[in-house]
Amino acid sequence: MNKKISQKNQPITKGYLDKSLKEYTETIIEVMDFGFEKNKKEHEEMRKINSNLEKKIDDTKTLLDGYVNAQEGFKQEFEIVKYRQSKVEKVIKSKLGVEIE
């Protein structure tokens, strides 16, 4: 930050006010720049965190899609086996006269 202007025994003149205003303005700009830089860094950190989170979510969705597809495949295979079993049972009953329970 800038040096303070000594107010002892100094008349308030236009030059003094201009100099004070300039120093205050520079100080405010420095503080704002610091705040913007800090905010920018925090924003970029949050963007990285969000990017990592989105990747993990996408990986999880891919994993779940694979699991659901596998389960659907098992369900379809089970239905086919069940259908074939009922046909086999009918043939055994009609040809051999044996009912399977």
Image: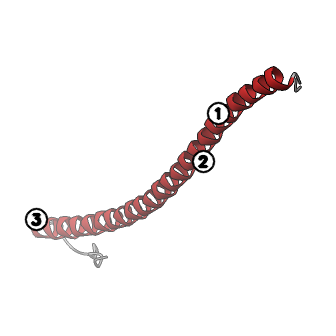
> In screen coordinates, is 4 left or right of 95?
left
Say which of 18 and 62 sits in front: 62
x then y, percent, for residue 10? 21, 73
Mark 2: few, some, or many residues within 10 Å (few <14, many ≥20)? few
Q: Is residue 23 above or below residue 84?
A: below
Q: CA distance from mark 1 to mark 3?
A: 96 Å
Which residue is denoted by mark 2 in the rendering? 67
**Residue type for callout 3:** Lys
Which residue is denoted by mark 1 in the rendering? 80
Disc number placed over residue 40 in the picture, else none: none
x then y, percent, for residue 36? 32, 62
x then y, percent, for residue 25? 21, 64
N-term mark: 1 or 3:
3
Which residue is denoted by mark 3 in the rendering? 14
> In screen coordinates, is 81 left or right of 65?
right
**Residue type for callout 1:** Ile
Secondary structure, mark 3, is helix
N-term mark: 2 or 1:
2
Residue in the image at 51% along x and 56% along y: 59
Q: CA distance from mark 2 to mark 1?
A: 20 Å
Q: Examine the image and state in which quarter residue 90 appears.
A: top right
Task: Locate the N terminus by quadrant.
Answer: bottom left
Q: Examine the image and state in which quarter residue 101 appears.
A: top right
Secondary structure, mark 1, is helix
